[in-house]
Image: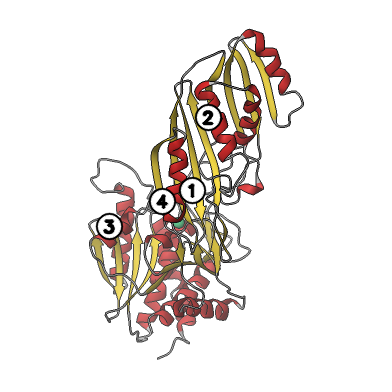
Amino acid sequence: MDRKSLDSKILELKNEMIKGVQGAIRIKSVEKNDKSGFPFGQGVHNSLLYCLKLSEELGFRVKNVDNMVGYAEYGEGSELIVVLGHLDVVPEGDGWTYPPYGGEIHDGKIYGRGAIDNKGPIIGALYALKAIKDLGISLKRRVRIIFGLNEETGSAGVKHYVNVGEDLPVAGFTPDAEYPIINGEKGIVNCKYVRKMKPQGDKYIKSINGGIAPNVVPDYVKAEISISENIKNEAVKLAEKRERIKVESTDFGIIVEAFGISAHGSTPEKGINAISVLFEYLSLLNFDGTSGELVDFINKYIGRDTRGKLMDIYMHDDISGDFILNMGVISGDENEVGIIFNMRYPVTKKYEDFMDKFKGIMESNNMEEKSMRHSNSLYIPADTDFIKKLRMVYEEKTGDIGEPICIGGGTYAKSMKNVVAFGPVFKGEPEVEHKPDEYIKINSLIKNAQIMAAAIYELAN
Ligand SMILES: [Zn+2]
């Protein structure tokens, strides 16, 4: 039997599918360190039990892998296809018109935290598989719908899945990003470096604070500079004609504020880094000692460079573009200053290609590593058989061109080999995930299920 009747089968399952999604939204599955004994808290655990029970009722084999992750399985065969999704959600926040855990339907949309990210799509995948099963369509490979429990704050559940030796896919997708197909994701490094400071001489950095997250270009930073009385006026004067700098005299010296323009850390060239602006001004003050060393270091190796060129760690490939460097956060006082960097390297490059040099520069400038988090780059060439299949299905179902894309961010796909991001957000649909009044359009839920059913069929045959 071929897959022609899958679309209409999914339409028949529509009401059941909507109920399934509503039920999942009604469980508040924000990760919590509670006393439940479950790795991600009672709420997340309940959402797993809910999905496993639903999967069982739909006639699938299920497994709870140590409360870390679970899955529904269908079909036979040694090779495996997966659809990877997650049941944890970010906190609801304020500003909702409808109850965030109500699953209410208004104007053809199901509202609630997790509606699009990611409960709607993964339950859509479950019903896509149900349609295949109900029609008795034969598959050559086994299929698993994997319910991850820890996407928003890590990927510990999927890591566990891999570590305990659960079967790995020959191909798969995660409906946790957008269409068409994301076949490349830059590698991402977040790291924090600290340097010891000493208050010394007639001027030094007394405190400095700016930036809200590693992956955001800081638009504001404020520094307190201790300066002796006789050179205070000169310092204030130096700022007079400078853009984006405000200097105010105070009892211990001066307060310097720098104003930048915020942008996402994957495109820092679209913003102006307030920390860079601040340090350009500070270089005019000719500090001695550790303050002077810090100022020199930042101006020499970072400045306004967003490509790692000043550190000579710049790389590029034609598929995904440039190496990206963002100095996201700075904070400290007269004893210690910490800086958090966010770096993204091209999809065909490796961590090893630049990290030795980066660490060498940090070390020789007395910057001590405090944390280093890395997620690999992901790249599956567009002419790979399974990518071509996903593209074919997407184009057939939408009439749109499905040229795969590379992104600077990271998706859930990185947590498992041979998986790419595919859906659920269609071109032109607004971003509603992580926002108040998150929703999934019922039409999109159905369309997603139809696309996923066809994709599962193609990948599994
Ligand atoms: Zn997600």
Which residue is outermost to the right? 241
State the CA–CA distance, disc 1 to disc 3. Answer: 33 Å
Residue with the mark numbered 1: 99
Position in image of residue 416 (x %, y %): 36, 64
Q: Residues within 10 Å of mark 1 (few under 14, many from 20)?
A: some
Residue 101 appears in the rendering: no
Q: Mark 2 touching mark 4, by CB under 8 A?
A: no
The quadrant where residue 19 appears: bottom left
Residue 302 appears in the rendering: yes
Dot 1 or dot 2: first in sequence order is: 1
Q: Which mark is residue 294?
A: 2
State the CA–CA distance, disc 2 to disc 3. Answer: 41 Å
The quadrant where residue 285 appears: top right
Q: Which mark is residue 171?
A: none
Amino acid marked by disc 3: His
Q: Quadrant of the N terminus?
A: bottom left
Amino acid marked by disc 2: Leu
Residue with the mark numbered 3: 160
Task: Judge whether 77 appears above or below 66 on screen.
Answer: below
Residue with the mark numbered 4: 374
